[in-house]
Amino acid sequence: GVPVNSRVSSKIQQLLNTLKRPKRPPLKEFFVDDFEELLEVQQPDPNQPKPEGNQVNVLQGEPLGVVTNWPPSLLAALQRWGTTQPKAPCLTALDTTGKAIYTLTYGT
């Protein structure tokens, strides 16, 4: 071979080594294969508290009237209704006997 100055050669070798290194870690370093763990049935913790009370069911409210000028989205409808009817009930929580205990309105 051709004799090369060792100082230049080491700098070129360092540059080559830098360029050979991957810029990003390989994908396998980010990927965790936990599929087998997902298939395992986890046993419930015996110290975990058990649910109490009756199962809650959703009640169906009043049907919506037919309106020709519907807002373009649910968010727009809530905004319109909240500004025109701020004291109207939005959500009501019932106790186990069916009595209203909390009522949330659209406005203050």
Image (spheres, rainbow, N blue to C red):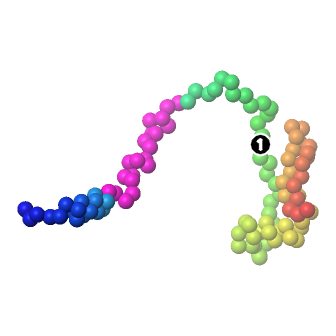
Q: Main secondary structure of the magenta part?
A: loop
Instruction: Give whichever of 6, 39 is nearer the camera.
Output: 6
For the point 78% across and 40% down, which residue is it? 56
Disc 1 target residue? 57
Where on the picture, by quarter, is residue 101? top right
Note whether 53 is above or below 62 in the view shown.
above
Please indicate whether residue 98 sits to the left or right of residue 55 in the image: right
In the image, residue 28 lies at what x, y percent?
Answer: 38, 48
Residue nearest the observer in this picture, 23 or 15? 15
Which residue is at a point 14% across and 64% down the rendered structure image? Answer: 4
Q: Which residues are magenta?
A: 21-41
Residue 2 visible? The answer is yes
Type of amino acid under label 1:
Asn
Percent position of residue 32, x then y: 44, 43
State how many labels appear.
Answer: 1
Give the side of residue 78 with respect to residue 38, left or right.
Answer: right
Residue closest to the eye, 22 or 48: 22
Circle 1 Cα neighbour tier, 10 Å, few/some/many (<14 / 14–19 / ≥20) = few
Which residue is rendered at x = 32% and y = 57% of the image? 21
Residue 5: quadrant of the picture: bottom left
